[in-house]
Amino acid sequence: MGLTPREDARAEVVDDINHTGYSSDDAVSASPALRAGDLPPGLNSSAGALFALVVASERVRVSDLADALVARYGVSRERALVDVATFVQRGQEAGILSYHQMHRNRVRGRARFLRDLFLVPVRGAMFLPSVQRRYRPYSGLRLLADSAAAQAQLAVLTVLVCLVPLSLISGLWSDVGAAFVVGFSLGVVGGLVVLGVAHEATHALVSTSLGSPPRAVYRQGMRVGLHRMRLSPGRDLAVAVSGPLLGALLGAALLFVLLSVDRAEPSTMSRAALIGLLIATSFQVACLVPPAADGTVIMSSLGRLRKQRRAAEAGT
């Protein structure tokens, strides 16, 4: 069961399997240490079967591992994908499995490269598809620290992307230019960090209040996410919408305050900070639509709600 990237209708699931951060079209491989030795002790039959498949192949797609569980145990494909995601996460934490992001075909791979290059905050994994996903047990402090660090990285990249071209074509380093640079940088960095931390904290709080407390925090490049189990479509929709919606509303409130300050005492720095904060707020709005992870979950939850409604209507 080797790695054969292809368009597979069965792989059309939420990009993050049950919000775990894994995708059915990605791949798994065994570490050299695992290949050289025996399988870890204490495995149940399903984990042992999955380890055997991974060791036997150079790389195995997540969807192929799920197919093996479906064929062997007769479980639903959705349940099998979740079990494989949990298996991969624990294997990564133990240092015996490696996870590889794959693209379904060359055309989509190139499109994702360009999308991630210019829309880094939407995808959040920089523009390197091989960045490893790192999981750690969930805690509120860890989530806030990882979110702040990821958003700070994104802010630095955003400032460089925006200001370097301007500095080459204008007198950006004059007295007025220096004030613009400082104000813009403060607006972008402060906005992205504050709104990003509020975004992730809201996801965690809403998810916990609805009965699905986060189990782990994962980091992949500039992307931070929560590993939690799926809820009903309506509750999943509420969790997905809550983060970017609060971030956008908080950004709008900060923009209003900063605009009031600028009207009282106009300055180049305050106006530049307004532009930077507007960019940070627009990132939150972009999270509400695909291909952002939250936007993907929103669309999936709406689709599940429509299916439930049709099923209810057919049953009456």
Image: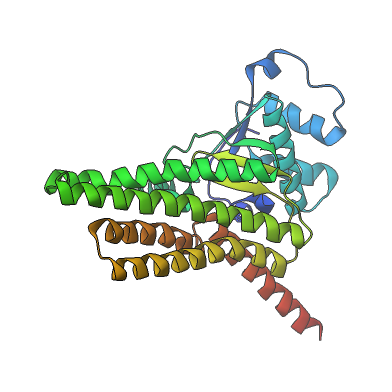
Viewer can see residue 25:
no
Viewer can see residue 213:
yes
**Residue 19 spot, x, y in % from top left:** 66, 52
Position of residue 104 in the picture relative to residue 203 (left or right): left
**Residue 128 spot, x, y in % from top left:** 44, 37
Position of residue 96 in the picture relative to residue 47 (left or right): left
Looking at the image, residue 235 lies above or below residue 42: below
Q: Residue at x 37, y 62 (%)?
A: 278
Quarter of the rendering occupied by the N terminus = top right
Position of residue 212 in the picture relative to residue 64 (left or right): right
Looking at the image, residue 121 lies above or below residue 92: below
Q: How is the image coloured?
A: rainbow
**Residue 129 spot, x, y in % from top left:** 47, 38
Looking at the image, residue 19 lies above or below residue 29: below
Q: Which residue is nearer to you in this view: 67 or 188?
A: 188
Q: Residue at x 63, y 58 (%)?
A: 202
- Quadrant in the picture for residue 135: top right
Residue lying furthest bottom: 316
**Residue 219 spot, x, y in % from top left:** 57, 40
Residue lying furthest front: 265
Q: Residue at x 67, y 41 (%)?
A: 64
Residue lying furthest top: 36
Q: Which residue is nearer to you in this view: 128 or 136?
A: 136
Q: Which residue is nearer to you in this view: 234 or 69?
A: 234
- Quadrant in the picture for residue 305: bottom right
